[in-house]
């Protein structure tokens, strides 16, 4: 990666390199992802959706200090589609709803205490 490149490395690429091989049942089902998008009325960003589809069920990747929120529990708050939380629930990560359909939308951190994006 070039020093001037500010994009975060592809999380799926990192997962493949850092963890044991991915298997067929390691991701959330297409039905679960589609149901979440329908329920929320918001598309998941392409990179997040691909990551969830391949690795969403892998606890060692997604349920440590930072926990991937399963499709059934995704929610919108303060204009953000929230997809990750810390294990103590003190912070969330989300993407702006109006940018959720973009290939690589900005990620915003939200504090559960103050309720303001950081």
Image (cartoon, rainbow, N blue to C red):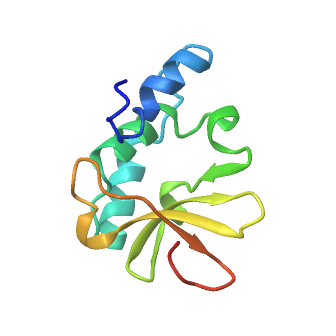
- The percent position of residue 9, horizontal first and vertical second, equals 42, 32
When asked about the image quadrant of residue 37, the answer is bottom left
Frontmost residue, 34 versus 80: 80
Indicate the quadrant containing the N terminus: top left, top right, bottom left or bottom right: top left
The residue shown at (49%, 35%) is 27
In the orientation shown, which residue stands out farthest toward the front?
3
- The percent position of residue 5, horizontal first and vertical second, equals 32, 35
The residue shown at (32%, 35%) is 4
Query: Compared with residue 32, is residue 14 higher up or lower down, i.e. above or below?
Result: above
43 left or right of 16?
A: left
38 left or right of 11?
A: left
Q: Is residue 27 visible?
A: yes
When asked about the image quadrant of residue 99, the answer is bottom left
62 left or right of 101?
A: right
When asked about the image quadrant of residue 86, the answer is bottom right
Query: Compared with residue 24, is residue 111 higher up or lower down, i.e. above or below?
Result: below
- The percent position of residue 45, horizontal first and vertical second, equals 30, 52
The residue shown at (70%, 33%) is 60
In the orientation shown, which residue stands out farthest toward the right?
88
Frontmost residue, 62 versus 5: 5
Query: Compared with residue 81, is residue 25 higher up or lower down, i.e. above or below?
Result: above
- The percent position of residue 26, horizontal first and vertical second, equals 54, 29
Q: Is residue 23 visible?
A: no
Total numbered circles: 0
The residue shown at (51%, 33%) is 55
């Amino acid at each position: 990666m070039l020093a001037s490149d500010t994009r975060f490395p592809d999380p799926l690429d990192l997962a493949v390199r850092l963890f044991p091989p991915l298997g067929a049942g390691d991701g959330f089902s297409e039905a679960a992802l589609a149901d979440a998008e329908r329920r929320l009325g918001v598309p998941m960003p392409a990179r997040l959706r691909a990551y969830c589809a391949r690795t969403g069920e892998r606890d060692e990747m997604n349920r440590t200090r930072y926990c991937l929120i399963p499709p059934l529990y995704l929610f919108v708050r303060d204009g953000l589609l929230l997809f990750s939380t810390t294990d103590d629930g003190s912070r969330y990560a989300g993407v702006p709803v109006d940018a959720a359909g973009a290939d690589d939308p900005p990620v915003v951190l939200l504090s559960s205490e103050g309720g303001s994006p950081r």
